[in-house]
Amino acid sequence: AQSVTQLGSHVSVSEGALVLLRCNYSSSVPPYLFWYVQYPNQGLQLLLKYTSAATLVKGINGFEAEFKKSETSFHLTKPSAHMSDAAEYFCAVSGETSGSRLTFGEGTQLTVNP
Amino acid sequence: GAVVSQHPSWVICKSGTSVKIECRSLDFQATTMFWYRQFPKQSLMLMATSNEGSKATYEQGVEKDKFLINHASLTLSTLTVTSAHPEDSSFYICSARRASSYNSPLHFGNGTRLTVT
């Protein structure tokens, strides 16, 4: 079975500060990892994905994530937070044994303070 | 632009009635679509996998007779909530992949907010 755990259901940062959202995964096979963002009353938008190529993955809106196998982590970062980054962020995992299904983490609500 | 369209975006219905939600892939064919349910402040829970031309695969604990899924074409899947009750009130989201590969990301619709009174 595969799973992801997002540490911290709420993260609050000041505008211009570093954003760090944590995600740890559990998988018995090489995982494929994704970060999605959800704005209120909307579906999910893909930020970035890791599919066994480069371990440092760059996504949209200035976000990036680094796959660390030794730590089973895939943390999401952004050097400088913007007010428009305030949203819910979900880490997700899929893999060969799960077919085409995605398993989501619990989500992290990011608040950006002026 | 959006590649998966979901309709309606919100609906209010009375207890005992049925509601149909549509999910369309706009510029690609999707043999498989996924239906999720999301409660407030919670993550997405996979309800069922919709397979074009065959029966949907339901997750454990999801009533297949209550949540009817039809995937009659390669671009359209529908979820019908039958005999809705207030506890069915939730945010329903569909998704689809452009390709059949498991490392291809899912594209999501904008969701449907269902309120049952």
Image (cartoon, rainbow, N blue to C red):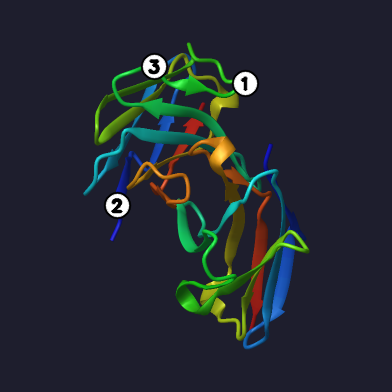
Q: Secondary structure at mark 2?
A: loop
Residue A9 position in % (x across, y down) = 74, 57
Mark 1–mark 2 distance (CA, rounded to whole Å): 29 Å
In this rendered view, identify the residue nearer to me: B6 or B100. Answer: B100
- Residue labelled with disc 3: B55
Query: Which callout, 3 or 2, points at the residue further toward the start of the chain?
Result: 2
**A46 lies left or right of B51:** right
In this rendered view, identify the residue nearer to me: A5 or B104. Answer: B104
Residue A19 position in % (x across, y down) = 66, 77
**A105 lies left or right of B36:** right
Crowd band around label 1 with a 10 angstrom C-alpha radius: few (<14), some (14–19), many (20+): few
Callout 3 and callout 1 share a chain? yes
Kindly identify which chain the residue marked by label 3 belongs to: B
Q: Amino acid at mark 2?
A: Val
Query: Mark 1 and 2 residues: CB-CB less than 8 Å, in contact?
Result: no
Kindly identify which chain the residue marked by label 2 belongs to: B
Q: Residue at x 55, y 34 (%)?
A: B46
- Residue labelled with disc 1: B60
Q: Vertically, is B22 above or below A3?
A: above
Crowd band around label 3 with a 10 angstrom C-alpha radius: few (<14), some (14–19), many (20+): few
Total numbered circles: 3
Mark 3–mark 2 distance (CA, rounded to whole Å): 24 Å
Q: Amino acid at mark 1?
A: Gln
- Residue labelled with disc 2: B3
Q: Please tell me in which quadrant of the rendered image residue A10 appears.
A: bottom right
Residue A24 position in % (x across, y down) = 73, 57
